[in-house]
Image (cartoon, helix red, strand yellow):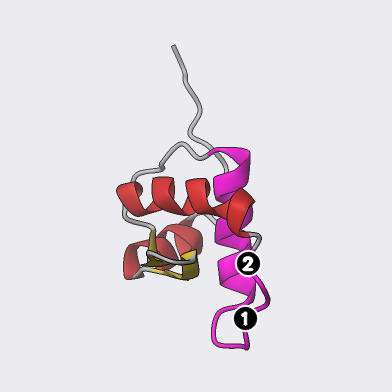
Amino acid sequence: MERVRLTKEERRVLRWLQRNDGSKRKQIEKLAFAPAVRSLEQKGLVRGFWSEEVGLVDAALTESGETYIFFNPRLQNPINWN
């Protein structure tokens, strides 16, 4: 699987979703996580559940996101060898 370049906040969201998968979710830091979730949605790693009134309600890893974490558990960014 090809590695995707992730920001610090995106890695934080992926780790949070991985740890809290299947258990009762804590309150999401909506203001901090919403932009990262939206960016991860565009990359196909996370699915965010949005409400017009509240904004970000919940988020979950997609199958691609779980596969990405399986092959890259430390969430390291790809190295630019040039």
Q: What residue sits 38% from the left and 64% below the top?
A: 52
x and y percent of residue 47 in the render?
37, 65
**Residue situated furthest top in the rendering:** 82
**Residue situated furthest bottom in the rendering:** 23
Pick whichever, 67 or 62, lies toward us: 62
**Residue situated furthest front in the rendering:** 53
State left or right for residue 35 relative to residue 50: right
Pick whichever, 60 or 5, lies toward us: 60
Q: What residue sits 57% from the left and 70% below the top?
A: 18
Q: Which residue is mark 2?
A: 28
Task: Specify the label residue 25 is tagged with.
Answer: 1
Task: Specify the label residue 41 is tagged with.
Answer: none
Name the secondary structure under disc 1.
loop
Disc 1 residue crowd, few under 14, some 14–19, many 20+, Cα 10 Å: few
Q: Which residues are magenta?
A: 7-28
Above or below residue 3? Residue 63 is below
Identify residue type, mark 2. Ile
Q: Is residue 30 visible?
A: yes
Q: Quadrant of residue 41?
A: bottom left
x and y percent of residue 44 in the render?
31, 55
